[in-house]
Amino acid sequence: MKNILKINQIKKVALCFLVICTLGCSEDWLEPRPLSFYAPENTYDVASGLWGALVACERNMRHEWTGDNPPIHTEMVLTDIAVDGTTDKSSPPQDLNLILTPDAQLNHIDYNKIGWYWYEGFKGIKYANVVITRIDQPEDYQSEEERNHILGTAYFHRALRYYKLTHQFGDVPLILNEIREPKLDFYSTDREVILRKMKEDLEFAELWVPEVIDRGRVPKGAVQHLLTKINLALGEFQDAVASASRLIDEGPYSLMRDRFGVNANDPTRNVIWDLHRPDNKSSNINTEAILLVMDRIDTEGNSGGTTSMRQAVPFWSVNINTPSGNRGTTDLATNPIPQVLHVGRGIGRTRGNWYSMHTVWDDENDLRHAPGNWMNMEDLVYNNPGLQGSDPDYGQNLRMRNDNGQLLTSDSIRSWFSWPHYKVFIPDPQRVQPQGGHSDWYIFRLAESYLLRAEAYYWLDNLSAAADDLNQVRTRAGCEPYSADDLNMETILDERTRELFYEEPRKTELTRVSYLYAKTGKATASGKTYNSQNFSTDNYFYDRVMEKSDFYNKGVMTRHGNLFTMSPYHVLWPVPANAINSNTRGRINQNVGYSGAESNIPPLTTID
C-alpha cells in the first residue's frame, strides 16, 4: 500500500538513515566488534523510520558482492568449484590447515572474508531486530497490511542472515530482539532451533509481503525462495516442494527463454548473455529476477563497483610469453590492441578449477559455455605493442605451449584459466583499466528456484519430478534433457555449477546438503552414508571437494610456496576468536577442529 509521507516524516527518515549509515560506514566499519556492541540508539516513531532501518539491511546485503575481494569470493574459493588464485603472497586462503584459525586475520582484502560474514551477518540481524522490536511504536500506519509488510520484510532479512550463518558456522547465538545495552552473555543455539524459528517467521512474511514491489525491495517471491531453502535445511521436503511450487507455479515469474533488453538484436549473442547484462537484470521485462541488490553508477550510497573482472578474469597481462620468448601481453588501454577494454584487468583471484571449467560441461550446445559467453585463454591475443614488426605472433591467439611442448606461461594458476565472461563482464567507465563496474546483481533467480524444487524431489525419491524441474533450466540453456535415471545429487550440484557460478553462495549450499546427508543417512551416488555424530570429521562437503578439486590436497603449490590444503572440519568456518573472547559471561561455541572447541558446552535447544 502506498504510504503518503508528511514533510516532518521525510526529515525523520533522512535522519534515521544518516545515523544508520554513520554507524555502518565509519572509517573502521569493517573492524570486528563483539556482539555486545550491537546496540542501536535511534528512535523510530514513524513507519518510514522503520523502512529506513530496512534500507540499511539492503545496503548490508549489497556489500557481499562489491568492492575488492568481495565476500562472495570467499564463499566460492573454499569449495569444489574454485580456489584463490593469488600466487604472490602467503595470506590468501589456500593452505586452509595453516591459515584458517579463530585468531587469524579473517576479514581482510588480502586474506578472506569469513569474519565479514560473522560480523556483517549480525549487523544485518541487528538492523532487522530494531524493526521487529519497535514494530508497534509508529502511530502513522495506514493499515494492518502496512505494519505486517514491514514486519515481514524484517523477518526476511533476519532469516536470510541466519540461513547463511547456520551453514557457515553451524550453531550460533540466536538474537531475536533489539539489544539496547552492552550484553556479554550470549550462548550458541542449536542451528535447527534457529532455522525452525526462521521458518515460522517466513510463513508469516509470506502472508503479508506483496507479490509485486519495486526492484531492490523484498517481494513475496523472495520470501518463498528463502523459505524453500530453510524447508530443505530442516529436512522438511514436502514443505520445500510446496513453498517452491507457490513461487514457480503461482507467482509472476517465468524463465527468460527469448532474447530481450539491450543487445537483443545482436546476432552474436544469446539469451544467456541478455540475462546477465547490467541493464537487463532489474528491467520489468525480466520475469526471472526475484531479488536483486541495486548498485548504480553515480548514485548516492553506491559501492566501489563489482570488481567482477578483477576477481574472476586471469592475470593475463603478465607471465605470458610468445613462442619466441618475448613478453606477449600488456593491459594498457592505449595499446593498438586494447584487449583490457574487452575482457577487463583481471588478477586471477577467483580461479575456477578443472571441474568447473571443463568436466562439468557435458553438452556441447550449452549456451552458458558457448563462444562469446565463456572465454578461454586461447581467445585472447598477443597484444604487446613492442612485438610489432619483431615477433610474428603479434596479434595472434595465445598459446599455452610452444611447438616443443614448453609452457609459455610462468604461472598457470593465476594467469591461465577460463572464465564466465557473460557473468563477470560489467562495463566500468570510471576506470581506465576496467575491473568490473556498478551493476545490479541477482540474489535470487527463478532458475535456482527450479533447482531447489528438483533437490526437494530428489530427497523424496521422486526422480522423475526432479528431472522435470532440472530440465527447465537445462533446456533453456540449449542442452539435451536428463532422464530420471540420470538424476542424483551430483547432477543437481553440477547444474548449479553451470547455472549459478559466481552467483550462488556455494559454500553455504554445499554445507546445507552435507547436513542433510548426515541427518537423513541417505546414501550418495557412490553409496556412502554419513551421520551427525562425526559431522566435522566425515562429511559430504569434504568428500565432494576432494573429488572435484584438482588443487586441495593434491600437492599443488603456488609460486610463493603455499600448498592448497583442506580438512573435513572446514565444512564449518572458525568463529572469530574475538567474538568468543569478548563474550565473558556466556559461551559461544567454537567449531570442532579449531582451537577452543574443547571448551564447548551443549547449545541451547529452546527459545526464551
Image (tube, grey):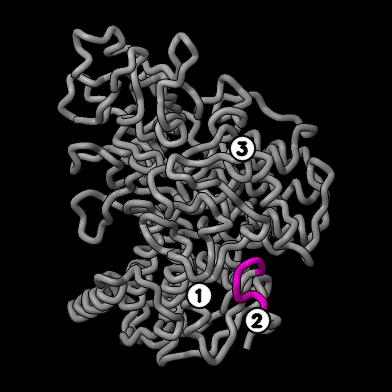
Give the mark nearest the N terminus, 3 or 1: 3
Question: Measuring 59% from the left and 49% from the top, which residue is drawn there?
Answer: 565
Q: Residues within 10 Å of mark 2 (few under 14, many from 20)?
A: few
Where does residue 84 sit, x and y in percent of width and height? 47, 46
Q: Which mark is residue 577?
A: 1
Left or right of 24 in this view: 132: right
Q: Residue at x 44, y 87 (%)?
A: 179
13, above or below 336, in the image: below
* Rendered residue at 68%/56% (across/down): 568
**Figure quadrant of the C terminus:** bottom right
Choose between 548 and 72: the one closer to the eye: 548
Residue 488 lies, in percent from the top left, at 75, 40
Q: Which residue is mark 2?
A: 599
* Distance in Å between CA atoms under marks 3 and 2: 41 Å
- Residue situated in front as seen by the camera: 117 or 487: 117
Amino acid type at mark 1? Ala
Does label 2 or label 1 sit earlier along the sequence?
1
Q: Would you say residue 352 is visible in this rendering?
A: yes
Q: Quadrant of residue 334?
A: top left
Residue type at tag 3: Glu
Magenta span has 593?
yes
Can you say which quadrant of the picture contains the N terminus? bottom left
Ranked by sequence position, the earlier of labels 3 and 2 is 3
